[in-house]
Amino acid sequence: MRHIGRVILIAAVYGCGNETEVTRPLSPDAQSTAAPSYNVVKFSSSLGGAQSRGMAINRTGWVAGWSDLADGTRHAALWRDGSITDLRTLGGPSSTVPWPGLNDEGMIVGISQTAQVDPLNEDWSCEAGGFLPNATNLICRGFVWENGTMRELPTLGGNHGFATGVNNQGEVVGWAETPVHDPTCTGTQVLQFRAAKWEPKSGSGEKIKTRELPPFPGDSTSAATAINDNGQVVGISGRCDQAVGRFSALHAVLWDKNGKPTQIPNLGGVTWHTPMDINAQGDVVGFSNPAGPGDPEGEFISHAFLWINGAGTAKDLTTLPGDPVSEAFAINSHRQVVGVSFGGASGARAFMWQDEALTNLNDLVHIAPDVLVSAQDINDAGQITGRVRDGVTGQILVFVATPVASSP
């Protein structure tokens, strides 16, 4: 499964240097009527490299994501209370939080290289998708981090694993390889992979419970991308392909609590139908190829989409002016959607969608010459995190944008 937003795209502690106090966030119960204005905090704290990104924000304002080190490796990171925490790795050089993988209890999920060499020399999702730098032929595994400890998540019998989402019950989803040599795999990919659901909190000292979520009927592989507090899971289903989206995402699917997959409506193409998030009401956002030249061959021409739970069609959220491509990454309980629009002369730009309008997030802030490049997650208070390009240094940093409360 490929997160294209990453390509234009998506324990050391350091103090934050120039963060500023933010305005009180809007109440989670507030009704949205028009796009609010935002105060932006730019986090200068990093792990020594020139790039960091916020991928998830919870109700307390903690931000999980990743930060590059000076040596070119990358570590999963947590920003809280004015400092950054290095989440370390599972023994390999790099780790990351590649999705909104943070719950309100402080559990964080992601992927990490291990010290084990891959005997099949596959280009697995974690590196082939651009989530981790410097391909090393090391096995990648999903992880769960809580209270200072990173634990490895088991696979479904194969070598590699990938964790994407966690709900407030501590249920984790992602995908993992099975031992099956799948003939629909291409390139260096060899093993089949399936959507997986883990329960790390199944009991003190007990083995982590792992459950396979089957693909849509007729498909060979599946991958889960998000889970809500009701236990509804969304993801992709298709052919093994190269384990980086494309023909692996022939169908966008929703698994119910019993693990039965049903198809989510798409934008009309054949490939890249990829849910990215599901809110408490069961509404889903992501990206999907419309019908058009290049789509049947797997070219990425996707638009952000919103599917309201139970609707017969998905809504095309379109793109910002001048851009051919967009992706929606997250949705909150108020149906505020955030993501990225890109491919045009203006470069990548963060967007917000609400009340039937797509807005450049940069038009709602006063931070020039800085640019909000992508919006990766939004909590129910309307706070947004993602990546911002410093207009002076060129560094890519983490930001939190907090909506300014309206005057009574």
Image (cartoon, helix red, strand yellow):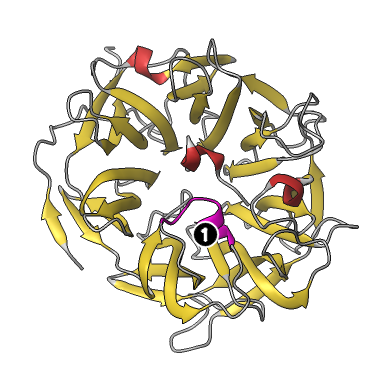
Look at the picture and state if 250 lies above or below 157.
Answer: above
* Amino acid at circle 1: Cys
Q: Is residue 132 covered in magenta? A: yes
All told, the count of numbered labels is: 1
Q: Is residue 265 left or right of residue 119?
A: right
Q: What element carries label 1?
A: helix
User: In the depicted view, which residue is nearer to us: 250 or 130?
Assistant: 130
Look at the picture and state if 200 lies above or below 399.
Answer: below
Q: Is residue 350 covered in magenta? A: no
Location of the C terminus by quadrant is: top left
Q: In this view, does 116 lie to the left or right of 280?
A: left
What residue is shown at x 26% (from left), y 38% (from top)?
A: 397
User: In the depicted view, which residue is nearer to us: 275 or 76?
Assistant: 76
Look at the picture and state if 103 lies above or below 287.
Answer: below
What residue is shown at x 51% (from left), y 75% (from top)?
A: 153
Disc 1: which residue: 126
From the top left corner, tell me how far across and down residue 278 is, in percent.
60, 44
User: In the depicted view, which residue is nearer to us: 325 or 41?
Assistant: 325
Highlighted range, magenta: 124-133
Q: In this view, does 60 lie to the left or right of 263?
A: left
Magenta-colored segment: predominant secondary structure:
loop
Look at the picture and state if 179 lies above or below 231.
Answer: below
What residue is shown at x 80% (from left), y 69% (from top)?
A: 182
Q: How crowded is mark 1: few (under 14 residues within 10 Å), some or many (20 or more)?
A: many
* Quadrant of the image occupied by residue 69: bottom left
From the top left corner, tell me how far across and down residue 299 is, in percent.
70, 35
Q: Residue 396, can we see it?
A: yes
From the top left corner, tell me how far across and down residue 136 is, in percent.
45, 67
Q: Residue 166, can we see it?
A: no
* Quadrant of the image occupied by residue 25: top left
